[in-house]
Amino acid sequence: MARVNANYDKLAAGYLFPEIARRTKAFIEANPGATVMRLGIGNTTEALTPAILDGLRQGVEKLADNSTYTGYGDEQGDSRLRQAIAGSYAERGAQIEAGEVFVSDGAKPDAANIQSIFSQDAVIAVQDPAYPVYVDSNVIAGRTGESRDGTYEGLVYMRCDESNGFFPHPPEQKADLIYLCSPNNPTGAVASKEQLKEFVDYARKNKAVIIFDAAYAEYISDKSLPRTIYEIEGAKECAIEINSFSKTAGFTGVRLGWTIVPKALLAEGAEAGKINSLWNRRQCTMFNGASNVVQEGGLAALSQKGRTESARLIEYYMGNARVIVDGLKSKGLTVYGGVNAPYVWLKTPNGMKSWDFFDKLLNECRVVGTPGSGFGPAGEGFFRLSAFGHRENIDKAVESIKVNLVL
Ligand code: MLT
């Protein structure tokens, strides 16, 4: 008799973004003709840049001729792209080899799948609030007990709140796998080098592994802030880094990302090289490589021209973030993030619950955002607005909040 994976029943709610989409759809059905401004999911809206389009077109053209056609590629990614990604780390003083780069179809699957190469009894620590994938993938894998009051038994929650600038210290207890995201989704907080060093020191002392999600690294404009954990000495012994072309080059729908698994990485019972070879094994079994066309686009995105163009896109979205931050502040709201990250984290007025504020913002202003509690219990009382959107929609949304939100 087939039985389903009962761990799915432990998941506290539907995945956050489909739930928001469901509620928004219900609102539109109940209010025919209403125009809703979506600042919920962090989804890119601006067209791909010319250099990237050229790269993608070249990728298609290669498929049009038998002499340049390719079928399956290397599961780990095109060697030219692996080399280019590795090269981009050198600029930040980090030495990464192409053999440590695993190209994928995005950061989300890697963030969800990476846990599978670690032991079933690994103790998981997450920032609270956190991108839901880190928690949910470990719940599904059976590393937690039941959910109670928004927390899962067996998980270590590292609270991120106003008192610590939304970035935690390492946990008091021993954790084996530690998920960190900086610039942070959802709070927009960015860890300093000193803060990351504290985690690297903790991980080396405890033989823990840090899973560092750097998907928003290119949004950092403050040069003193680290854009990769490998800027921290010793991080190659204890950290895996996940990154993506989604938010940097507008590949949310195109799909391309990568994970760095250093050969020097150590874990209990795993000598140098072992974890790199495990991830390689996992990818060879379960992944057939990223699309060849898309990888040509990725290469173009990493060219000088591609990077200059993408920097302009990022500046555009960060202009949106400034509009949101300034507008909310002028309304008297308490606002965090939105400076080196495309997410604005606002404190709900009068201590309102996050989902109540979601309904209020939708009803009064027709603006969709993301309830902080959807990212973990410490997100309760907060609300995320995404800076991804066309400027005119962002302007309209902020104006509507200024005029219509009743405080
Ligand atoms: C978000 O809105 O948090 C992200 O866009 C979702 C994602 O990257 O999967």
Image: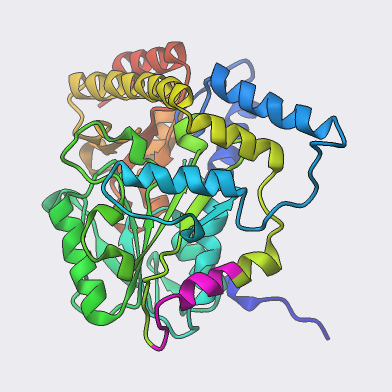
Tell me if I can see residue 250 in this picture: no
Asked if the magenta segment contains residue 35, the reply would be no
Q: Is residue 233 above or below residue 181?
A: below
Nearer to us in this view, 379 or 164: 164
Q: Residue at x 79, y 44 (%)?
A: 70
Residue 69 image position (x, y, % from top left): 81, 39
Q: Residue at x 55, y 74 (%)?
A: 278
Tell me if I can see residue 253 in this picture: yes
The magenta region covers 269-280
Q: Is residue 217 above or below residue 197?
A: above
Quadrant including the N terminus: bottom right
Quadrant including the C terminus: top left
Residue 59 image position (x, y, % from top left): 71, 32
Q: Residue at x 60, y 32 (%)?
A: 297
Q: Is residue 175 above or below residue 121?
A: above
Residue 123 image position (x, y, % from top left): 37, 79
Q: Residue at x 40, y 77 (%)?
A: 272
Nearer to us in this view, 189 or 305: 305
Q: How many marks?
A: 0
Residue 130 image position (x, y, % from top left): 37, 55
Nearer to us in this view, 281 or 19: 281
For residue 286, side relative to residue 122 (left or right): right
For residue 298, side relative to residue 193 (left or right): right
